[in-house]
Amino acid sequence: MYHRSQLLAACFLISDLAVTAASWLAAYFIRFESGWFPLYKEPATLDQCLRFLPLVLILSLVAARLAGQYAVHRLRRMREEVLAVCKGSALLTLLVMATLFCMQDPYESRGTLMLFFGLNFVGVSLARRVSWALIRFLRSHGYNQHFSLIVGTGRVARKTARALRRASWMGIKNVGFVEENPGRWTGDLDVLGTFNDLPEIISKYQIRHIFIALPMSRYNDARRVFDILSQSLVEVRLVADVPNLAGLSLTTTNLDGLPLLGLRESPHFGLNVVVKRVMDVVLASLALLFLSPLMSLIAILVKLTSPGPVFYKQERCGLNGRPFFMLKFRSMRINAESETGAVWARKGDARCTPLGAFLRRTSLDELPQLFNVLMGDMSLVGPRPERPVFIQQFSQTIPSYMARHRVKAGITGWAQVHGWRGNTSLRKRIQYDLYYITHWTPLLDLRILWMTVFRGLIHRNAY
């Protein structure tokens, strides 16, 4: 069962050693032979570089093992692989630096070691990427397949089967389902037997993976299945049936040996908050500097084409439900809401001025919110802020609506760049907002900002 994983780990080991050796030599030539960097003392010789190479390779084995670079698994994600490689390369560089310092070796060069870290990290990551791409291609075409079995026939079981079909690169093929009391609604599924038939089914189909996909109300059945499988060598995984409970995401952690499931956790904490805030301040400042002529022109046109102030302030709710006043270029007649009260904007809204209709259609009325970003009330990217009167209504009728307020509201967002803005499905918008909150990274923010330029400024639902 494990010989293929061991063979793959051995292949990765050989590849890593080759890349590490190449990186060590490349760092020497770039630093001392390329002429790209000034030399302030006698340069190291190639003999000194080669003399230390065997020890570098030995230390690389130690660092990679400690960083978990060879924890080969079909369900391992690429970002976990890259993180392990980064840890391994950093640890290797520190070990080499410490060894050189203790040996007082004349080859010691901080510049060379920094080059070595960068080259090794990039080189090993690329080698892994290419290797996994080849492996996944072969698996998706029927090679190196493992067979799996799903326990259950309900909604979660069906979703698990669909997920396995989509992720064919994992090389895990589902052969059927097992259910204690299959009903008439399971006639379209390959039900291979009951719980007691599991040992026989595992042997017959050479099952390697079991996915227990039973609803939470059938905990006793799940425990019984696990007891039946206790004498088998298959890998068993429990598919948690908690989508309706999880406000944001499902995470796992350990508390003194006690496994915990996190149902409402956000990646927006600690250093992540600092990174996002720095990005907001820097990018908003650059945007204001670049767009100031356009904003000045819009302000003049608003003042010339209709009586009233240039800006319109409206109360919205942001982080933790805290109210703030969001800025916009005024696009409606003054006191427009005194006639209708608080209502959503609609297509062909008679309250808009001619210029205001254009500003709304092109989203240019949103530009003053860059000042909200600098003041800390909003972020460049996040769920769009809503008015308190609507929040009271939506929080009572839409599950997990308040989870949107665990992060700062944004000028643009994942929902908006996918077309869910204006008078569109609010539930879909919430779904996309929660996905953004759960999967946030700085790169995702940059991707959304890039998409906003091409998808979010002008849209048929913008009014």
Image (cartoon, rainbow, N blue to C red):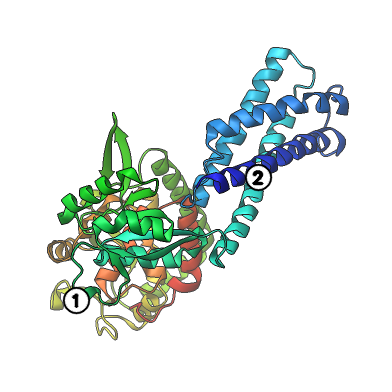
Q: Which quadrant would the C terminus be assigned to in this image?
A: bottom left
* Number of numbered discs: 2
- In this rendering, position of residue 67 left or right of residue 427: right
In this rendering, the label closer to the viewer, 1 or 2:
1
> Does 59 appear above or below 427?
above
Residue drawn at x 52%, y 61% is 169
Q: Nearer the viewer, residue 10 or 184?
A: 184
- What is the spatial separation of the Cα atoms under label 1 and label 2, in whole angstroms? 49 Å
Helix, strand or loop at label 1? It is: helix
Placement of 193 over or under 462, stated as above or below? above
The crowd level at tag 1 (other Cα within 10 Å; few <14, some 14-19, many 20+) is few
Q: Is residue 409 above or below residue 21?
A: below
Earlier-in-chain disc, 1 versus 2: 2
In the rendered structure, which amino acid carries the disc numbered 1?
A: Arg
Report x, y in % for residue 376: 35, 48
Dot 2 crowding, Cα within 10 Å, few <14, some 14–19, many 20+: few
Q: Which residue is mark 1?
A: 184
Q: Type of residue at label 2?
A: Cys
Closer-to-camera residue (243/320): 243
- On the question of residue 439 being in view, the answer is no
The residue depicted at 39 percent of the width and 65 percent of the height is 175
> Which residue is more in the foreground, 135 or 22?
135
The one of 423 and 246 positioned closer to us in this rendering: 246
Could you tell me which residue is drawn at 52 percent across and 41 percent down? 71
* Disc 2 element: helix
Measured as percent of width and height from the top left, residue 229 is found at 30, 48
Residue 11 image label: 2
Whether residue 339 is visible to the viewer of this picture, yes or no, is yes
Q: Toward which corner of the image does residue 48 lie, by quadrant?
A: top right
In the displayed structure image, the side of residue 125 where residue 384 appears, left or right: left
Query: Which residue appears at 38% of the width and 78% of the height?
Result: 361
Q: Position of residue 190 (x, y in %)?
A: 32, 71
